[in-house]
Image: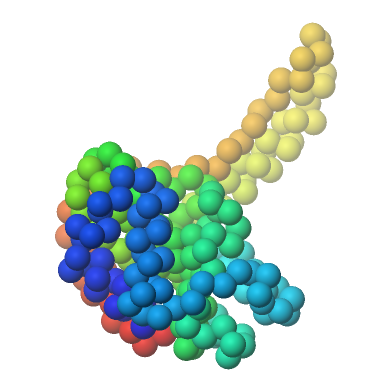
Amino acid sequence: MLNQLFQSLRDDKNSYLNARQGSEFEERIAQYMKMEIGLTRILKTDLSDRDWKLIKKHIGDKFGKTFLDIPSDNLKCSYIYQPYGSQQFPDFIVFTDKKVIPLEIKFSTKRQSKPIWNSNVPRANAFYVFGSYGLKDITFFCGDDILVPKHREFLYGFFNDIRALQDKIRVDMPAFDITNRGFTPYIRAAFDQRKHKPSVETSFFIHPERKEVEDLVIKESGIL
C-alpha cells in the first residue's frame, strides 16, 4: 500500500517539488494517498476512546521498535493529518490493512541536505520523507535503518542526565539571586548531525547507503 507512495516519490519527484513550502509538500503527499492509493482522511475524534488511547501510547513511546497492529477494522485504508498539531510528531498516522504507520515529513525550502530534528531523533517504528526544494531532491527512510537502538537511547539519555543536573542546580539558585530577577538554567533538548568521524556523511542525498535504505522502505511498506 504505502510502497506506492514511496515509489512515486522516487520516480516523480518534480510533481512533489513544485511545492515551495512544507505545508504544500505535505498536501501533495496527502493528495497522492487519497487519489492514487484510496486512503480516506479521518479525524482523531472519529476513533473510539479505546483505540485512540492505544495509538497515542504507542506513538508516544520514543523507544518503540515495532509497528502497532491496527486496533479496529473500520480504520483500514485511512489516515489522520497532524494529529498533535503542525509542530509535533507525526505529520500523518496512516492505517493500512494491517498496521498503524507514523509518517513524518521533513522539508527544506533552501539547499539543506539534512532535516532539522529539534527535540526528536528518528523513531525506529516510523517512516520519514525528506524533500529539499533548493536541491530538487527527495529521499525517504525508516528510522530503524539509520539509527541503532543503543545510539537512540544514549541521545535521549543525555538530556535526562542534564535535566537531573538542572534540577539540582536550581535548588541553589535562590541563594545567589540577590537582585530577585529569577535567572536560572534552562535546558532545551535539540539534536543535530555532525561529522564526528571520517566515515560520517550527514547529507541524506549523497549518503552511500541512500538507495539501500530507500529500497528497504519500499519493500517493508509493501507488506505492512
Q: Residue at x 44, y 66 (%)?
A: 103
Q: Residue furthest top?
A: 179
Residue 114 in view here: no
On the rendered image, what quadrant is the C terminus found in?
Answer: bottom left
In this view, the residue in front, 189 or 160, is 189
In this view, the residue in front, 101 or 95, is 95
Q: Is residue 206 left or right of residue 83?
A: left
Q: Residue at x 31, y 73 (%)?
A: 5
Q: Position of residue 39 (x, y in %)?
A: 44, 78
Q: Position of residue 199 (x, y in %)?
A: 21, 52
Q: Position of residue 146 (x, y in %)?
A: 34, 63
Please tell me how many numbered marks the rendered image carries: 0
On the rendered image, what quadrant is the N terminus found in?
Answer: bottom left
In this view, the residue in front, 7 or 16, is 16
The quarter holding residue 54 reads bottom right
Q: Is residue 13 left or right of residue 123?
A: left
Identify whether 93 is placed above or below 24: below
Identify whether 69 is placed above or below 200: below
In this view, the residue in front, 185 or 114, is 114
Q: Residue at x 17, y 60 (%)?
A: 208
The quarter holding residue 141 reads bottom left
Residue 164 in view here: yes
Q: Residue at x 25, y 52 (%)?
A: 18
Color style of the picture: rainbow
Q: Position of residue 125 (x, y in %)?
A: 47, 71
Q: Residue furthest front?
A: 35
